[in-house]
Amino acid sequence: MDYNEIMKKAIEAAKNAYVPYSKFPVGACLYCDNGKLYTGCNFENSSFGLTICAERNTIGTMIADGGKKIKAIAIYSPNMDNCTPCGACRQVIHEFQTDEGTDVITKIGENLKIYKLNELLPEGFLL
């Protein structure tokens, strides 16, 4: 899978973010082990605890479509370079990573930076 294509879809998804409070749009696109791409964006709520991150929104879409494992996920915000998942999203991604691990794709300027999820969350929790 072309990681530039996944990032392009994350960039497009960020344009749909609903962020009237933080003004911090984020888009995500994941590549599932079923070969499909799923996108999502963050959306806020005036009760801030109800805000949903782009990554978890995207993962929920994957689950609703029957997807099981994340091979790669791109995260993008026009507000910052190297926009990596928050701690909660790292844990949720961990729940669905493949046996080979999940690549986390970010953008720095015009370049992509690829992390393995285990670099970002070395001691993820599973039952």
Image: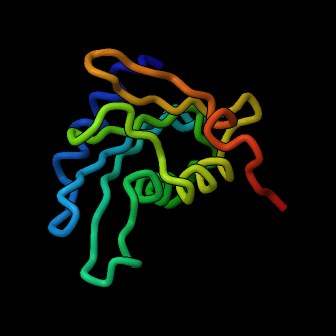
Residue at 77% x, 56% y is: 125
Q: Residue drawn at (46%, 39%), measured in percent from left and top?
A: 30
Residue 18 in which image quadrant: bottom left
The residue drawn where x is 22% and y is 63% is 22
Horizontal side, residue 89 vs residue 57: left or right:
right
Q: Nearer the viewer, residue 77 or 35?
A: 77
Residue 71, above or below 56: above
Left or right of 121, for residue 99: right
- The residue under the point 25% across, 36% down is 11
Query: Vertical placement of 54 versus 79: above or below?
Result: below
| 64 horizontally vs 127: left or right | left
How did the renderer colour the structure?
rainbow
Residue lying farthest to the right in this orientation:
127
Number of residue marks:
0
Placement of the C terminus among the 4 image quadrants: bottom right
Residue 12: x, y in percent?
Answer: 21, 39
Image spot of residue 126 (x, y percent): 79, 57
Please provide percent x and percent y for residue 64.
Answer: 49, 61
Seen in the picture, residue 76 relative to 7 is either above or below; the reply is below
| 32 on left or right of 106 | right
